[in-house]
Image (cartoon, rainbow, N blue to C red):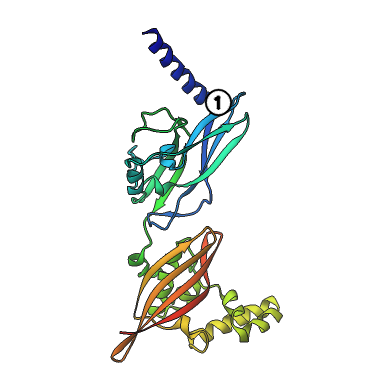
Amino acid sequence: MKKIIFTFLLLITAHVTFAQNMQISIGYYDKKVYYTDAYSEILVRINITNSGTETLYFKLADIHEFSLDFIALDTKNRNMEHSSQWLRNINSNTKVYFRDISLEPGETYSFIENVKDFLACDTAGVYVLSCAFFPSLRHKSDLSDAHILSNRIMLEIKPSLGPASLGMLPISETNLDILQAQAISPDQVITYMLNARQKSFWEQFFLYLDMEELIQKNPTKAKQYKAESEMGRMRLIEDFKQQLRQEKIEQNIVMLPSDFKIERTTYTDTEAEVRVIEWFAYNGFKEKKRYTYYLSSRDGIWTVYDYVVENLGTE
């Protein structure tokens, strides 16, 4: 009986030591506007710091769901549900591999996680987000295993700007003074752009096009653009837009699709590739093409800087 009590006291002492010497803090990796849309990642940096005077040891599972969890509470103090991916991982019967990590006093171990890998994030609203870290791994799906809680940060998730909502362009051609690019995902950018082209709303169509890059990829325009002053370049951009409206140049990008479907979207923090199947209606048949749009991100805004077209025949 004494041995059992002694072991129990050792476990309590170990957890108290962790709680005193291990500090968990979280912060946004690239703070931006977050949406319920699946492509809108919520990247958070987790920092584990040894604030004590002795070496700190802990385990970190290769499947991070066994080492940490996120908790998001809404304004009514209700927990956000976990994602389907989290449920699959935490309830799997696979063997959990882990690394033993040591931190010297004052050292910090950091890594980045996508909150959407842990939480559903499919309901728009304002939440308080925190992280629970399990130094000796978790063995249950609840929070009953020994863990340390991080600081709390505010998380606002906005409704999805998916194809249905993007089909309703925000302004008309007669009210362009409030037209401003938004921090939406790469596939949403392409959906917005193609919807604008279908309605012949040219300024909206140009909104997410990197005109400078497109001009410099045009053999007949690039040399002239580089030789111009800043004012001259602005005039060239306006001339370029006018020629696009009249379909005199870059005819592939301004072709009017009767329908389109996002086929695949891949992206990193700064580069994206969106593949789209587009159909073009003619008398008695439809032409089918695959467009691959290349986008880059600057200050959270994605713009198209290049594209390629593949002919897929007729239907």
Residue 308, position in %: x, y? 49, 77
Toward which corner of the image does residue 215 lie, by quadrant?
A: bottom right
Specify the amino acid type for callout 1.
Asn
SS at circle 1: helix
Q: Residue at x 34, y 39 (%)?
A: 79
Residue 253, position in %: x, y? 47, 80
Camera-side residue of 2 and 281: 2
Q: Residue at x 52, y 37 (%)?
A: 25
* Residue sitting farthest toward the left: 284
In this figure, which residue is indicated by the disc labeled 1? 21
Residue 298, position in %: x, y? 56, 62
Residue 287, position in %: x, y? 35, 85
Toward which corner of the image does residue 76 lie, by quadrant?
A: top left
* Total numbered circles: 1
Q: Is residue 219 above or below residue 34?
A: below
Residue 22 visible at all: yes
* Residue sitting farthest toward the front: 95
Camera-side residue of 298 and 59: 59
Camera-side residue of 211 and 173: 211
* Residue sitting farthest toward the top: 2
Q: Residue at x 36, y 28 (%)?
A: 144
Camera-side residue of 11 and 4: 4
Quadrant for the C terminus in the image? bottom left
Q: Is residue 109 above or below residue 28?
A: above
Q: Decide: few, some or many residues near mark 1? Use Cα within 10 Å; few <14, some 14-19, many ≥20.
A: some
Quadrant for the N terminus in the image? top left
Residue 171 visible at all: no
Q: Residue at x 37, y 58 (%)?
A: 160
Q: Is residue 307 above or below residue 25?
A: below
